[in-house]
Image: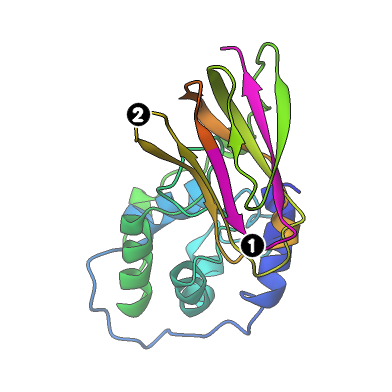
Amino acid sequence: MEIKNAFALIIVAGLSLVPVALAHDPITTKLTWTQEISRIIYKRCISCHREGGVAMSLVSYEEARPWATAIREEVLERRMPPWGAVQGVGAFRDDPSLTSLEVEMIVNWAEGGAPEDDPIYLPKPNFESLKKNPPPALSSVRTLVIRNSVPLTLAQNARAAAVQPLDLPDGASMDITAYLPGGAVEHLIWLRDYRKRWERTYWFRDPVFLPKGTRIVIDSVASASAVISFVDR
């Protein structure tokens, strides 16, 4: 399912709360909508949160301001933007996750009165940049299914290009780890508090080289498995 479709369901559960008017809150932060927060929202959120999107628009300050408290709660709980994979474990294409600094900035802005500042500083949203990249064109893609607690040992050198979780129920977690023959450990992906509506293939930003003899292990619920795509280059 595409990220924008997942957003619609997140909004029903979270940001569909009645927006809170905070017009009289004291301003206690130097972070502003026009200079900092709009840039984060435009980069991470407006693929869904715009006119014609699947959720309410957050493009303008007038549209975003009433939702400041709800936005704070969603980003703190890592429910928005929806992704599923824990940041810092694996590097993936089209990852919309907020960085820790971005979360901190949004929270401080919302708690500090959500000020606007001079509109002259407001950037123009680039809707063309929101188009998702198609899966990379890779040669000789082959797939293997790995089941929970049944390690897979590679019989030859390989490059892992993507991971797709299977049979992972709502609320479950999945940790896929590669144990290299020299003793090094490569954490491929960690899915936490998973939701089936997030179902997707996670493409690594760059294929991960795994030498012959590497053991790949899934730690998850008994029914879970995953498809790992390997490429020659």
Camera-side mark, 2 or 1? 2
Magenta span of residues:
216-233
Left or right placement of residue 85 versus residue 141 in this view: left
Could you classify mark 1 by the number of other residues whose Cα lies within 10 Å: few (under 14), some (14-19), or many (20 or more)?
many
Left or right placement of residue 129 versus residue 111 in this view: right
Report x, y in % for residue 119: 38, 56
Q: Name the amino acid type tagged 2.
A: Gly
Report x, y in % for residue 27: 27, 79
Give the quadrant of residue 191.
bottom right
Give the quadrant of residue 170.
bottom right
Q: Name the amino acid type tagged 1.
A: Tyr
In the rendered image, the vertical position of residue 32 relative to residue 16, given as above or below: above
Report x, y in % for residue 5: 74, 54
Q: Can residue 83 be seen here?
A: no
* SS assignment at label 1: loop
Task: Determine the residue located farthest toward the bottom in the rendered image.
Answer: 24
* SS assignment at label 2: loop
Could you classify mark 2 by the number of other residues whose Cα lies within 10 Å: few (under 14), some (14-19), or many (20 or more)?
few
Left or right placement of residue 120 versus residue 89 in this view: left
Identify the residue position indicated by label 1 in the image: 194
Identify the residue position indicated by label 2 in the image: 182
Report x, y in % for residue 26: 28, 85
In the rendered image, the vertical position of residue 115 relative to residue 222, given as above or below: below
Left or right placement of residue 93 versus residue 100 in this view: right
Is residue 222 on the magenta stretch? yes
Q: Along the polypeptide, which appears first: circle 2 or circle 1?
A: 2
Q: Nearer the viewer, residue 10 or 49?
A: 10
Give the quadrant of residue 7.
bottom right
Q: Residue visible at 45% across and 73% down?
A: 72
Asked whether disc 2 touches disc 1, contact meaning CB atoms under 8 Å apart, the reply is no
In the rendered image, the vertical position of residue 221 relative to residue 208, given as above or below: below
